Image (cartoon, helix red, strand yellow):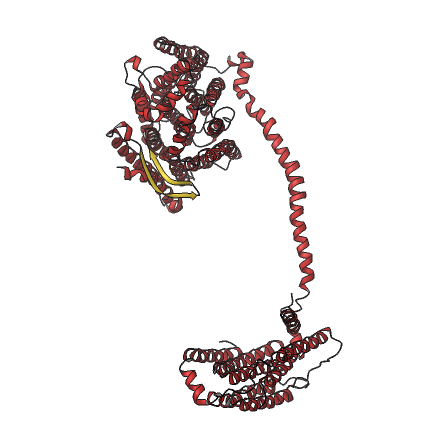
Amino acid sequence: MVTRKSAVPSALMLIVTFCFLAALYLTLNAQFLAVVQVAVYAGAIMVLVVFVIMLLNIRNEQYTITGNWKTVVGILGVLGILAQIISVFIAATDTLPKHLSESAVQLGTVESVGTKLYTSYAFPFEMASIILIAAAVGAIVLAKKKLT
Amino acid sequence: MSQLIPYIVAAPLVGFLINGFFGGKYKNKAIAGWVASMAVTASFVMAIAVFSEMLSMPAESRAIHYKLFDWLSVGKVNVGISYLIDQLSIIFILVITGVGALIHLYSTGYMKGDPGYTRFFTYLNLFIVMMLQLVMADNYLLTFLGWEGVGLCSYLLIGFWFEENKNNDAAKKAFIVNRIGDFGFLVAMGVMLVTFGSLNFSDVFGAASGMGSGNTSIVIITMMLFLGCTGKSAQIPLYVWLPDAMAGPTPVSALIHAATMVTSGIYLVARSNILFALSPATLTVISIVAICTALLAAIIALFQNDIKKVLAYSTVSQLGYMFLGLGVGAFGAGVFHVMTHAFFKACLFLGSGAVIHAMHHEQDMQKMGGLKKYLPITFATFLIATLAIAGIPPFAGFFSKDEILWKAFSQGSTLLWVLGAFGALMTAFYMFRAVYLTFYGKERFDAAHHPPHEVVPAMWIPLVALAALSVLGGFLGVPKILGGGETISQWLEPIVGKGEEIAAQSQIMQGEGMEIPLVIISVVVALVGILMATRYYKKRTTLASQEQKLGTLYSLSANKFYVDEIYDKTIVQPTYFLSNSILYKIVDVKIIDGIINGSAAGIGQISGMIRKIQTGIVQNYAVMIVVGILVLVSYVLIF
Amino acid sequence: MSSLSNYLIVSAILFMIGASGVMFRKNVIVIFMCVELMLNAVNLTLIAFSQFMGDQSGQILVFFVMTVAAAEAAVGLAIVISVYRNKETVEIDKLNLLKG
């Protein structure tokens, strides 16, 4: 998705990526989050993004990947960090758990996540809803043509 | 009654605040005058209440401490806003508030119609607050607060008519000269802190009386305190500001530059009498400076033509007498003269103010004359006060001045007495010269067009009151030898007794039984002075001056011994030169500004370089973040 | 079933792809999508750890991350729209008001 010149193919590829991620969640027995991933990300957010792309009707990007100091340094930096992370993982392989925990199936269900959300995390949950409302209002205000 | 003490200060403070904040909004400006006068009168009444309570107590327990709150508490040093009312300070409080109230009343008439009417009374009330602070404090720091405060008020009031540049110059001169003295006070406080570890009177005096006479620290402290006094109380070499201070309105001259502020030096010495008594060297210096000041100022006063200048130099001279009393260890006598002087000098100044008022702001005595019939009340009070200052019995000045002269003879030396008596002769001469030039002889002004008129009651009531005090005030201190009770010395005994006792130990007493002859001589001397003035000035009709025949003496006196010019050449001009040519043009502009501008320019250049990092392109920042993370994580991984 | 480090490596790769997109793309909307991708990479890490260690808190956190991401999407896209309205562009190197 990063290498496409046009934004729309990028968006479509991102949706696919999200779906694959949802599949990965499923392999981890996190059913609830897998569903939410598809619904919220692949569904809601990406639809929004695609709408905006259509609304703005932007030209294709003019960009080159070569010559620029920024590009060289950036790529080197990214690869360096990736190497670091992977080296850390490899060094720590022995200490990491090899298998899913026994309760993994139980932990990923809608029931158990919901129970936890509405009991121990009730307050953050309410805060999250306030954030969402604020964001909705903010988005409307920002996107309006003019304040009256 | 002692709970009234803080309100003595609070009353004029409230007056100051009311006039200061709301003065601009008064529809009728007279309100300001009444508010201010009432405030000072209230504090006078409270002072009397406290005083009468003190009278009913035994002499030893008359000192009242009243602590308001802690002011500074650093380490072992603890300075409070706390007041000490005792026999010494109550005299000053009564004089300040009493004379102050009369002068406030007088000012309501004198300043009428002045555009700065409310401002004037605001300053005047602030002055009273500060002056009370000075005399009521129970530690040197609070005294210093008042000391500086009265200096500020003096500055503000000398430059009250600030439209004229010469008034501003006079104000600045007063302030700067006073600063030199204040420096001495500050040094003294510093040495005191090091030596005694405290600034409270009781601690300092308690610790000092345990030390031997002539202790170096005490000598330094007292010398520096006296330097402060020479500034505030106009002694050689710092007296030069006081004559110029006459640029202020006349009530100010009466209140600040005659009756109260200039006597704060005497208060300070009298308050610290134990310290001064322990330092005979300082006392000697004080005596010498005092007698020189008294004589020099008297000589200058001989041929001044400005009525207020005569009074100003007379004040300097009288302050010299007070310090003479202190210098020979007669602290009580000095304080007594402060009190009587406050009465008659305030009366003289207010009288001169009435004359000036009547003459439409003419101060030159050569253009007056014959005012006796126009200003009968002013003339009568002026004459009484003049008799008092000349030392004619039974007026107030006679007793106080004579006590000082007697102490100068018995505890000092014959020379001090001779010089003092000579000063008294000149005092009588120049004061009566002023009376004759002003009130007698031919009218040397245009009486037909501008007839002088007697002043309003608000102005003559204080005159009469002060004249009455000038007559009666002396009886508080009638010496034993004349059948009196020396009330004032006995009253002050618990405060200054110890200092006088210590001082007496290093003095040779002389003159047993000489008191009566000396008193008679000094009265005769004063009468001679009056007769000389009568001989030369009473009938004078023309101004063709025989004075000029006196040659050198006349020109020296009329030109004030060229002291101002000498100071100008030796101190002011070199200071200007140093400030302008060296400190300003080289040190300030080249070195200090150079350093500042150089560092600013250097930082500007460096930031000009660093600024380029801020490209404004967000993605560059993102790259930097990534590189930063890489570096940081590498650091963590490697080490 | 693959081991935990496989998930983590996938997550790291996804994260770095997102990061390079943020660094190199000019289109603000694409950059925005790359940020979403980075968030998802982190989510994957969280869920993997959560399921392997048997601690549900990780999943709860992911839930909140999604909530905030949704909010962010709404606001961010609104900002993009208003920027486009003012500047007639969504190219990030034309938006250099931060230049010092």
Q: Is residue B2 above or below residue C96?
A: above
Residue drawn at 57 percent across, 89 percent down: A24
In the current view of this chain or complex, which residue is farthest to the right? A67
- Rendered location of residue C16, percent (x, y): 64, 80
**Is the N terminus of chain C in the top left, top right, bottom left or bottom right quadrant?**
bottom right
- Rendered location of residue B279, percent (x, y): 45, 23
- Rendered location of residue B631, percent (x, y): 66, 70
Q: Is residue C18 above or below residue B6?
A: below
Q: Is residue B150 above or below residue C63?
A: above
Residue drawn at 67 percent across, 68 percent down: B615
Residue drawn at 66 percent across, 67 percent down: B614
Q: Nearer the viewer, residue B509 or B557?
A: B509
Quarter of the rendering containing residue B471: top left
- Rendered location of residue C83, percent (x, y): 59, 77
Residue B184 visible from this viewpoint = yes
Q: Nearer the viewer, residue A99 or B442?
A: A99
In the current view of this chain or complex, which residue is farthest to the left? B56
Q: Nearer the viewer, residue B230 or B354?
A: B230
In the current view of this chain or complex, which residue is farthest to the front? A94
- Badge count: 0
Q: Is residue C56 left or right of residue B482?
A: right
Residue C27 visible from this viewpoint = no
Quarter of the rendering containing residue B46: top left
**Is the C terminus of chain C in the top left, top right, bottom left or bottom right quadrant?**
bottom right
Q: Nearer the viewer, residue A73 or B38?
A: A73
